[in-house]
């Protein structure tokens, strides 16, 4: 069944393998059967005060990377948040019925406030109302986000309900998280600590734009030890992680060969890492090449942005017109 789906992507950096196997691959499936709105959340990005150059660069890069990975501007509505200012009007309406107490209780706000005590701005506080506006401007009912966004989504439902109740209408849906369930492939990082993520420092994540030498360098630095000394011994987590990466990028025969070598203690981690690096490079290369060609093609990027903007604004303008009417803004 087709649903209206919205998701926002913060323009905070390059996509890595974990992003690809996390949200992105599922976005690709969703766009086939649903009315999807995927946007680059550059307004949200302002809470950390980027420079104008950085802001524009990041937006372009993210757009290029998403398109390179297969998000299709003809299937999904792919747009830049700040190209659709209608959402900001809805944000203002929601803010009139958003209360200081409830906004201050949001975990992500509390965390940010703790991490950046000198920049606890109102935009940070009202992040959940902007997110509600992002979603409800298209009256979407499903939002593919991770667990960390559940509380923000709960706020979206609160604002939708509050609006509906206040104006005695059923205008806004109460959006729920779209759960990927078992389809999520967990990608471990290279530092042996668990999940691939960019915040863990250089070397933990393999980015889709990494060149061959960088990939090799990162993989060769991954934690190993002097190898098993007892046959069929249990695999330490950091070795298991390397095998999990192999599962993603290597041939079955190759994986079996190294698993057998682990079991009979003949494994040489240096060789295994070289193999993993070569296979990883082969996997990443097509993404890297595509990203490079798109990011340097300003004409294509602005065509894609315009196509998304037009579609998104049409949907947003319809909502704003109806919301103004419900609230009682009528031209005199
Ligand atoms: N808050 C989301 C995140 O941190 C990004 C986001 C902004 C978003 N607006 C949204 C996600 C609307 C889904 C729907 O990842």
Image: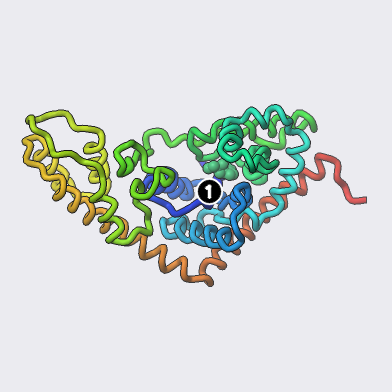
Say which residue appears at 36% left-offset and 38% top-offset.
Answer: 195
Residue 327 falls left or right of residue 182:
right
Say which residue appears at 39% left-offset and 64% top-offset.
Answer: 290
Q: At which x and y percent is residue 114?
A: 58, 34
Q: Circle 1 is placed at which residue position?
A: 9
Q: At which x and y percent is residue 131?
A: 63, 41
Say which residue appears at 48% left-offset and 57% top-offset.
Answer: 72
Query: In the figure, residue 306 lies in which quadrant?
Result: bottom right
Q: Is residue 107 above or below residue 299?
A: above
- Closer to the camera, 313 or 52? 52
Whereabouts is ligand 1, in terms of quadrant?
Answer: top right
Judged from this view, the residue extending furthest toward the front is 118
Q: At which x and y percent is residue 307?
A: 58, 62
Q: Secondary structure at mark 1?
A: strand
* Crowd around label 1: few <14 · some 14–19 · many ≥20 (10 Å): many
Q: At which x and y percent is residue 233?
A: 12, 29
Residue 70 falls left or right of residue 232:
right
Q: Is residue 136 visible?
A: no
Query: In the figure, residue 116 lies in which quadrant?
Result: top right
- Closer to the camera, 306 or 61? 61
């Amino acid at each position: 069944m087709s649903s209206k789906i919205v998701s926002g992507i913060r323009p905070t950096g390059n996509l890595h393998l974990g992003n690809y196997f996390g949200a992105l691959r599922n976005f690709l499936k969703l766009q086939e059967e649903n009315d999807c709105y995927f946007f680059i959340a550059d307004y949200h990005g302002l809470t950390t005060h980027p420079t104008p150059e950085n802001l524009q660069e990041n937006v372009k890069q993210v757009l290029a990377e998403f398109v390179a990975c297969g998000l299709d501007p003809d299937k999904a509505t792919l747009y830049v948040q700040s190209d659709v200012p209608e959402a900001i009007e809805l944000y203002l309406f929601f803010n009139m019925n958003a209360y200081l107490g409830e906004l201050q209780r949001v975990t992500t706000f509390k965390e940010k406030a703790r991490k950046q005590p000198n920049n606890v701005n109102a935009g940070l506080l009202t992040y959940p109302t902007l997110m509600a506006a992002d979603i409800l401007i298209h009256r979407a009912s499903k939002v593919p986000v991770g667990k960390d966004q559940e509380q923000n989504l709960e706020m979206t439902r609160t604002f939708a309900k509050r609006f509906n109740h206040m104006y005695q209408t059923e205008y806004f849906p109460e959006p729920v998280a779209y759960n990927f369930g078992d389809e999520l492939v967990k990608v471990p990082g290279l530092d042996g600590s668990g999940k691939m993520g960019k915040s863990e420092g250089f070397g933990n994540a393999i980015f889709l734009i990494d060149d061959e030498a960088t990939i090799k360098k990162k993989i060769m630095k991954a934690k190993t030890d002097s190898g098993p000394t007892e046959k069929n011994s249990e695999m330490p987590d950091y070795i298991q992680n390397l095998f999990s990466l192999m599962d993603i990028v290597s041939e079955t025969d190759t994986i079996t060969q190294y698993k057998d070598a682990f079991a009979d203690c003949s494994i040489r981690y240096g060789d295994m890492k070289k193999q993993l690096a070569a296979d990883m490079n082969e996997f990443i290369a097509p993404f890297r090449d595509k990203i490079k060609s798109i990011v340097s093609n300003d004409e294509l990027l602005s065509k894609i942005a315009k196509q998304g903007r037009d579609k998104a604004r049409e949907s947003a303008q319809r909502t704003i017109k109806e919301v103004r009417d419900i609230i009682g803004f009528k031209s005199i």
